[in-house]
Image (tube, helix red, strand yellow):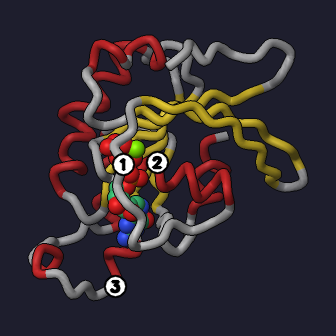
Amino acid sequence: MGDFSRIEGLDWIKIVVVGDAFVGKSSMIHTLSTGQAVAETRKYEPTDSQCYYVNQTFHEELRRFQVIDIGGAEACESRSRFYSTADVFLVTFSIHDRTSFENVISKWIPRVCEFQADAKILLVGLKSDKRTRRWGQTTDVDVKPIQYKEGTELSKNIKAAGYVECSALTKKGIRKVFAEAV
Ligand SMILES: Nc1nc2c(ncn2[C@@H]2O[C@H](COP(=O)(O)OP(=O)(O)OP(=O)(O)O)[C@@H](O)[C@H]2O)c(=O)[nH]1
Ligand SMILES: [Mg+2]
């Protein structure tokens, strides 16, 4: 992947998205950039690192986002160069994966602070549809989803600008994530 340096003359807000593998980062970005919900049957393809340019209008004002999607499974060393120029970090977890929630504080926040302590941080709970839906798979039955209150408490602990939830499956909350990131 290239350097993704800022395009001169344009007022891009550079957003770097981090979080564990499989939590739904790429799906969230896909839904924002295409306006299409992801299908439940969508095949999982781990991301290395990917850059997107997205225009969105909020309150009649055009915002341009450069969104860098960093795969959760990639080695740490190769990520650091993308961290250092971020305006905003979306630190993500899946509301259906408690390990990914715990890794926000044990893994992702230390990493973000090491490379770019001044950037705004927004905590994002992904796959919010999984809290309310009943799932047939036995693997889903035992999972105790992260509650909204737990998300807001964690966002205060890590001194984030706020906490938002969204679902790429239903599209609920997706635009709000990026509106809050501005
Ligand atoms: N129910 C539900 N499933 C989702 C949602 N978002 C993503 N998924 C599914 O979760 C899996 C992982 O999604 P990805 O977006 O590829 O995850 P990722 O965080 O980008 O993973 P890495 O690139 O490996 O870091 C896929 O099978 C998606 O279809 C969501 O909002 N709701
Ligand atoms: Mg991905």
Q: Is mark 2 within 8 Å of ligand 2?
A: yes
Q: Residue at x 55, y 49 (%)?
A: 29
Q: Which mark is residue 26?
A: 2
State the residue in front, 161 or 73: 73
> Which marked residue is nearer to the observer: mark 3 or mark 1?
1
> Which marked residue is nearer to the observer: mark 2 or mark 3?
2
Q: Is residue 6 above or below residue 26?
A: above
Amino acid type at image mark 1: Glu
Which type of secondary structure does the marked residue at label 1 adopt?
loop
Q: Is residue 18 above or below residue 59?
A: above
Mark 3–mark 1 distance (CA, rounded to whole Å) = 24 Å
Check if mark 2's residue and mark 3's residue have beta carbons within 8 Å: no
Question: Which residue is tagged 3?
Answer: 133
Q: Is residue 156 visible?
A: no
Question: Which residue is tagged 1?
Answer: 45
Compare marks 2 and 1 and give the one earlier in the sequence: 2
Check if mark 2's residue and mark 1's residue have beta carbons within 8 Å: yes
Check if mark 3's residue and mark 1's residue have beta carbons within 8 Å: no
- Looking at this rendering, what residue extends furthest in the right direction? 60
In the rendered view of the protein, which quadrant contains the C terminus?
Answer: top right
Q: Is mark 1 within 8 Å of ligand 1?
A: yes
Which type of secondary structure does the marked residue at label 2 adopt?
helix
